[in-house]
Image (cartoon, rainbow, N blue to C red):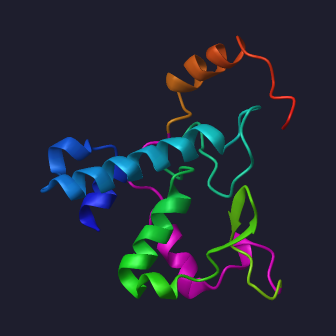
Amino acid sequence: MENCLSVWRGYSPIEIAKSEEELATLETLLLLFFEQELNWGNEEWQRSTYFAPKIRTPNRVRPRDMLMGFVVQAFSLGIDNIAYWQRIRPTTTTFKSPDGSNYGFEDYPIQYKRFFDELRDDGEALAVMVEPWRSKFRSLSEDFYNNPEY
């Protein structure tokens, strides 16, 4: 789990992996984190998330925290004990309980929510969509049309 946290903090998998299998796993995790940072947040082209970055405090919370919280939960409780990891549509996952009795992350059971909340304010893990990258991505996005299928 420590190497997963290191990648979440921005360290290179090449520098920390101890085997080829671990390197492949950590590189995949890095790509998943990057996808979260690009596609979820506050920007016009992003989907909304409970983990949207805070521009003035880029280490407060990051979109990739959603994935890392589940990784920590899996290591701590076992993969079969992750609360509510389910697909409700072909494009997303949810924090909602299977019976629909809660409204998402704000109502996620505290014994599971802590795995996400404990990631807050990490001094090394900075959000991607803050300056200077935020301006670069905004500029780049202006060169492309919106997806008509979205």
Q: Taking 118 as reference, is 124 above or below it?
A: above
Picture residue at 62% right of the left edge, 55% below the top: 51
Q: Position of residue 94 (x, y in %)?
A: 70, 69
Residue at the outermost left position: 18
Relative to 29, 18 lies left or right: left
Q: Position of residue 57 (x, y in %)?
A: 52, 43
Q: Position of residue 75 (x, y in %)?
A: 36, 78
Dividing the picture into quadrants, the one containing residue 92 is bottom right
Picture residue at 49% right of the left edge, 86% below the top: 80
Residue 108 in the magenta stretch? The answer is yes
Relative to 69, 90 lies left or right: right
The answer, for residue 92, to whether it is visible in the render is yes
Picture residue at 79% right of the left edge, 18% below the top: 145
Relative to 80, 123 lies left or right: left
Q: Position of residue 147 (x, y in %)?
A: 80, 28
Picture residue at 32% right of the left edge, 59% below the top: 4
Dividing the picture into quadrants, the one containing residue 21 is bottom left
Residue 67 in the magenta stretch? The answer is no
The answer, for residue 9, to whether it is visible in the render is no
Q: Taking 86 as reference, is 18 above or below it?
A: above
Dividing the picture into quadrants, the one containing residue 103 is bottom right
Q: Which residues make up the magenta segment? A: 101-127
Query: Depth check: 23 or 46 in front?
Result: 23
Q: How many marks?
A: 0
Residue at the outermost right position: 148
Question: Which image quarter holds the C terminus?
Answer: top right
Question: Which image quarter holds the N terminus?
Answer: bottom left
Query: Depth check: 123 or 128 in front?
Result: 128
